[in-house]
Amino acid sequence: MKRAWLGPLAAMAALTGCISSDESGQKTVAPVIVDAVAAVEPAAQSPLPPAAEALTFDVLPEAKPGQTFDAWLEDVRAAALTAGMAPKTLDAAFNGMKLLESVIRLDRQQAPNSVTPSFRTYIEKRLTEDKIRRGLNRKQAVLEPLTHASTTYGVPKGVLMAIWGMETNYGSFTGNTPILPALATLAYEGRRSELFRRELWAALQIIDRDMAAPDDLRGSWAGAFGQTQFMPTSYLRFAVDANGDGKRDILGDFSDVFASTANYLVSHGWQPGLGWGFAVQVPGALDRAALQQDTLPETCGRVIEKHSRWLTAAEWQALGVKIADERRGWPAPETKMSLLEPDGPDGPAYLTTENYRAFLKYNCSNFYALSVAKLADALDG
């Protein structure tokens, strides 16, 4: 099998990326990763397969009641062959594959009703002086590809660095779980079978198109891989060949890593020139009940429920909301902003723009998104 894109960091093959979290930061996989979103114009330079945005991922069968893992793999193989996948791809992918009990245990630990820490506690553990210092040092080492991606897509360098830092600690740990058996286990096990069947099919397509060999696809127990942790569906849709070498290497080529991350954000709503928001001081008399949203989106609704409805920057100023850092300025008066108080009215408060919602598409957790935002501010200096 031709190893088409993997770079010099192949030995470091995470915990997340393009996966979601609850408010505690617990990693769970979100349906948003398989949304069909058209790539922005710069991504047209990448060697996407024909009609990449129209790729079909609902191919593999659900396990029948009482069916063994090995018997289900035979059904998967038959469905893949019917869909046109090469037999050698399936031989390479499924040779010696075993159910990973450790992955099932990790998945079941994603308890939706677990006790969540406060945002203050969460951020203190993740946004440390060492993390900022390390990020500033690593920024200099990757400045050229980082700057190119930032200029091309209009995503600040600090944002790209912050996602890299939060996802894999600037590449120090990208995960070493073989993602094919991990995805197959989760697709078979049933709790979120439909989601993981899609991801397994996408991973098989990556192999079938000679983008990677099975042994090279290593990452998190939930199937994310690369420096900024893309799920296989997201790789097929949003990974970019930024340097024109015919590869989309999100593991070892930082031109591709940062361009792919920026492309993902812009494809999910990031607007160049608009910040994510800022910390604010809220007057005690603010009527929060009058600011509640009327409707919530189907995706990430429980997390977005923490936000107020949209008001313009001018309207927030008229309500007496003030920017916490006086060195910052307000955006244009008509800019839509939403109030977020992650620990409630007695905790910190933030006005967030539509760009903040792009962070939630990357990982559906306010704690995660605010951590990225605050780290980005620290690394943009």
Image (spheres, helix red, strand yellow):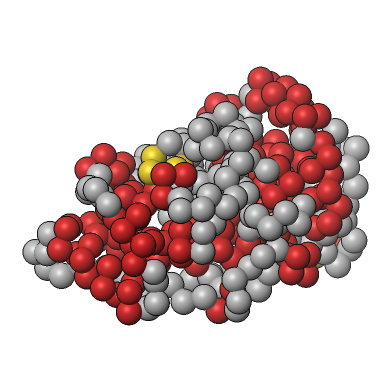
Observer able to see residue 119: no
Q: State left or right for residue 186 relative to residue 304.
A: left
Above or below, comparing residue 375 to residue 97 in the picture: above
Residue shown at the point (12%, 68%) measured from the top left = 65
Residue shown at the point (58%, 35%) measured from the top left = 9
Residue shown at the point (90%, 47%) measured from the top left = 329
Q: Quadrant of residue 346?
A: top right
Q: State left or right for residue 192 relative to residue 218.
A: left
Above or below, comparing residue 322 to residue 205 in the picture: above
Above or below, comparing residue 331 to residue 9 in the picture: below
Residue shown at the point (53%, 70%) measured from the top left = 35
Please name whichever residue, 380 or 283, is drawn nearer the observer in this view of the structure: 380
Q: Position of residue 25 (x, y in %)?
A: 48, 42
Q: State left or right for residue 161 relative to residue 32.
A: right
Q: State left or right for residue 262 relative to residue 173.
A: right
Q: Position of residue 122 (x, y in %)?
A: 53, 33
Disc count in the image?
0
Q: Quadrant of the C terminus?
A: top right
Q: Position of residue 121 (x, y in %)?
A: 53, 30
Please name whichever residue, 158 or 211, is drawn nearer the observer in this view of the structure: 211
Please name whichever residue, 175 or 281, is drawn nearer the observer in this view of the structure: 175
Q: Position of residue 290 (x, y in %)?
A: 63, 65
Observer able to see residue 375: yes
